[in-house]
Structure formats: structure tokens, C-alpha cells
């Protein structure tokens, strides 16, 4: 039986379609992702907490869902929007359909809408609040609920997705370094990339103090990706400043990158519709090489607000926003995108090697 669903945006734009996944009602910031594959990694990326995600690729679900490609303990999207959701799958690793997976986790979805029109609307008007419902299909009533839902601006969400307790992720092979990862919404593949380079990782909650982190005597500190507005996390920024003073190698990505920018006095701002997809062109200003990178963020660091000791190392070629930073003297660098590259592309994995080199150099200096 086909059940109707309705998507209402906060500016009153309405899209009517069919329900898939769980039935119910959900609200969040409507954003779009341009990746052609990787919907399971997108669903389980904690950086999407608080957001309703629209996929620009028209057919989603055709290779099903498996137990290996999850990036965290559960899906975090508030809702899922596609042109067509495949009811069958064809892949040797798949264990269930996308529809049954969303039902299992209570994720409300809508299909058979004009996703091209929706994406053009978001690009024109900007990311905004939205609601999907299979219960209340009255446009005026649903719009009223959308307008009562929280805005992403100044919304803190890392505390929602972070781990509650410290835990260890072992090194693969010989242990060479100990890395503390601050979990603002870490993806499992970041831990895998560090692990296969000989790092034992201690993952700690987002609100862990600098003192507690330094007591673990790490060789390096990794600041993960995560959801929400970085401007809402000033207590965390204060702790990062203390870590900076310890002169430990620090590598930040996504939200971690934005927090590093703030720790050095920089400002962040909300992008009109953000960067989300596995096909974003980034220029490495040192090598002049272009990387095709995976992005998922709605905020950026303001280059003009950064102090002289911070150098911009990468820029997004779509809009020239800051995509990478480094401190000119301290072993600290960050990028706005996702070098763990799950599901891909893999152009940016060298950044993990750079982090390893920094820790090696710091160890050699300390042994002299």
C-alpha cells in the first residue's frame, strides 16, 4: 500500500510524495548531498545530526545495506529525501533493503518528489528548516510545526552524538603512537586510518578537559568531525587553547577544523547551503594540486579573521572558502573536509601521513 508523505520547508514550499522508511513526523535543517554512492555512510555520519538530507542522485538503495559500512553506532539524519528508493538490492555484502533499515531505526523518508527542484530551491534560498510527515499532511499545520523547530544557528549538537565513556581503538600491527581523539561525532573510518598507521587511539567525550587529555600522555590529538554550530562551543574552544599551549601535534577535520580556527581567535560563519558530497574540488596551495574531497559541513572559517601565525593551506574551488589551515610554528593543522574518505574519494588520505610525520618529529625532539 502506497502511503502519502509531505515535505514542507520553512518558507512555505511544499513537496508531496510517498512515504518510505519509517512512518511518522520529523524536523530538521534541509540540506542536499551530491554523492552518487555512500548513502549508508551518509546516514550514519554523526555530522548529519539535526538535518534532513536530500540525495541529488536519483536512485538510492540499489546496493542495499550491510553491517560493514556503518560509520557510527546508528543513523543520525533526522529524515531522508530521495527521488526513488529501490525496494530491491543487488550486492553480495547486502543484508537488508534501505527501506527496512530506515524502518528499524525510525528514520522517516519521502520519495517520488522532484529532488532537482528541491535542490535548486535550497541553492537559491539557502538551507532552512523543514519537516516530513506521513501523519499530518495538512500543509499549514505542518508549516506551523516547522517554524517551531530549532534553527541550526547557535545549536550545539556534539554533546548529542559523542561517546559517553572513554574507549580504546587498538593499533593494527605494531603500536607506534598513542592518539587521543576528541569525539565530536567521529566516523569509524578515521579511527581505522589512524589504526593502520600504528596508532592506538583513546576516544574521549566532547566535553573532556584538556587536563584529562594530557594526563593520558598522547603523542598526538585528533579533533574529529561533528554536527552543529561551532560558535556554540566556546567551552570546548577554551580547552583546545590549553591543548595548543602543550605543543602536542594536533590534527582537526570538519568541526574540529572550525574549532581550531576559533581557538586561534578566528571566526566562523554559516554558509548559504553548505558543502556536502564526495566530489568537492579543493586546491592545495602548497603543491598546487587539486584534490577531489568528501565534504559535509554548513559552517566555515572566515579567512580574514585569522591571525598572522595561521596560514590558509587549502581552498574550496567552488567558492574559495577556507578548506585547510596550519600554524606556522606549532605542529597544528586542520582541513574542512573528510580525509577518512568513506566511501571515497581517496585523494586526501596523505593528511593522516602528515599527522604521523608530525608525531614522529615531536618524538625525536623529545628524545634529544
Image (cartoon, helix red, strand yellow):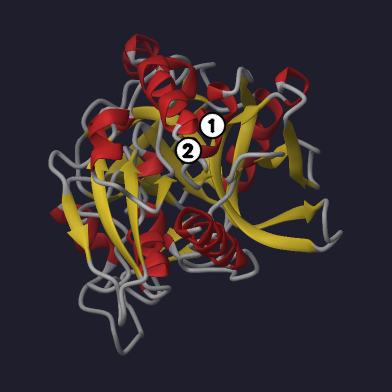
x then y, percent, for residue 68: 27, 74
Position of residue 129 relative to residue 248, above or below, is above
Position of residue 181 relative to residue 49, above or below, is below
Residue 86 quadrant: bottom left
- Tag 1 residue: 260
Residue 200 quadrant: bottom left
Q: Which mark is residue 277?
A: none
Residue occupying the point 62% across, 20% down:
269
Nearer-the-camera pick, 135 or 152:
152
- CA distance separating discs 2 and 1: 6 Å
x then y, percent, for residue 182: 33, 41
Residue occupying the point 24% across, 39% down:
215
Is 285 displayed left or right of 145 in the figure?
Answer: right
Q: Which mark is residue 256?
A: 2
x then y, percent, for residue 72: 27, 55
Is 169 displayed left or right of 269 in the figure?
Answer: left
Q: Residue furthest bottom?
A: 92
Nearer-the-camera pick, 280 or 53:
280
Q: Residue furthest right?
A: 288
Q: Can residue 79 be seen at all in this image of the molecule? A: yes
Nearer-the-camera pick, 197 or 338:
197
Count neighbours of disc 2 (C-alpha within 10 A) and say few if under 14, some if 14 to 19, many if 20 or more: many
Q: How many marks?
A: 2
Residue occupying the point 34% across, 38% down:
184
For the N terminus, which image quadrant? bottom left
Residue at disc 2, secondary structure: helix
Mark 2 and 1 residues: CB-CB less than 8 Å, in contact? yes
Q: Can residue 114 be seen at all in this image of the molecule? A: no
Residue at disc 1, secondary structure: helix
Amino acid at each position: 500500500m502506497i502511503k502519502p508523505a509531505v515535505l514542507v520547508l520553512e518558507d512555505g514550499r511544499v513537496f508531496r510524495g510517498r512515504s518510505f522508511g519509517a512512518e511518522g513526523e520529523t524536523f530538521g535543517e534541509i540540506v542536499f548531498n551530491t554523492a552518487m554512492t555512500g548513502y549508508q555512510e551518509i546516514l550514519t555520519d554523526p555530522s548529519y545530526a539535526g538535518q534532513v538530507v536530500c540525495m541529488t542522485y536519483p536512485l538510492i538503495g540499489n546496493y542495499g545495506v550491510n553491517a560493514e559500512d556503518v560509520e557510527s553506532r546508528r543513523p543520525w539524519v533526522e529524515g531522508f529525501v530521495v527521488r526513488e528508493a529501490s525496494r530491491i538490492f543487488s550486492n553480495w555484502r547486502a543484508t537488508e533493503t534501505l527501506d527496512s533499515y530506515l524502518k528499524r531505526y525510525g528514520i522517516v523518508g519521502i520519495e517520488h518528489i522532484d529532488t532537482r527542484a528541491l535542490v535548486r530551491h535550497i541553492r537559491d534560498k539557502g538551507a532552512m528548516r523543514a519537516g516530513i510527515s506521513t501523519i499530518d499532511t495538512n500543509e499549514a499545520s505542518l508549516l506551523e510545526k516547522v517554524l517551531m523547530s530549532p534553527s541550526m544557528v547557535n545549536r550545539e549538537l556534539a554533546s548529542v552524538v559523542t561517546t559517553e565513556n572513554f574507549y580504546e581503538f587498538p593499533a593494527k600491527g605494531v603500536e607506534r603512537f598513542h592518539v587521543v581523539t576528541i569525539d565530536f561525532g567521529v566516523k569509524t573510518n578515521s579511527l581505522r586510518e589512524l589504526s593502520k598507521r600504528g596508532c592506538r587511539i583513546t576516544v574521549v567525550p566532547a566535553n573532556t578537559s584538556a587536563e584529562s587529555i594530557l594526563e593520558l600522555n598522547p603523542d598526538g590529538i585528533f579533533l574529529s568531525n561533528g554536527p552543529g554550530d561551532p560558535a556554540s562551543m566556546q567551552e570546548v574552544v577554551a580547552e583546545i587553547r590549553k591543548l595548543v599551549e602543550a605543543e602536542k601535534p594536533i590534527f582537526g577535520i570538519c568541526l574540529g577544523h572550525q574549532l581550531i580556527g576559533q581557538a586561534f581567535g578566528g571566526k566562523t560563519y554559516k554558509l548559504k547551503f553548505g558543502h556536502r558530497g564526495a566530489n568537492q574540488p579543493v586546491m592545495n596551495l602548497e603543491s598546487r594540486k587539486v584534490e577531489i574531497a568528501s565534504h559535509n559541513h554548513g559552517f566555515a572559517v572566515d579567512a580574514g579573521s585569522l591571525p598572522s601565525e595561521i596560514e590558509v593551506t587549502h581552498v574550496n574551488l567552488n567558492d574559495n572558502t577556507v578548506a585547510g589551515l596550519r600554524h606556522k610554528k606549532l605542529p597544528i593543522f586542520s582541513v574542512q573536509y573528510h580525509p577518512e574518505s568513506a566511501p571515497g574519494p581517496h585523494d586526501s588520505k596523505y593528511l593522516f601521513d602528515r599527522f604521523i610525520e608530525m608525531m614522529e618529529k615531536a618524538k625525536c625532539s623529545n628524545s634529544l
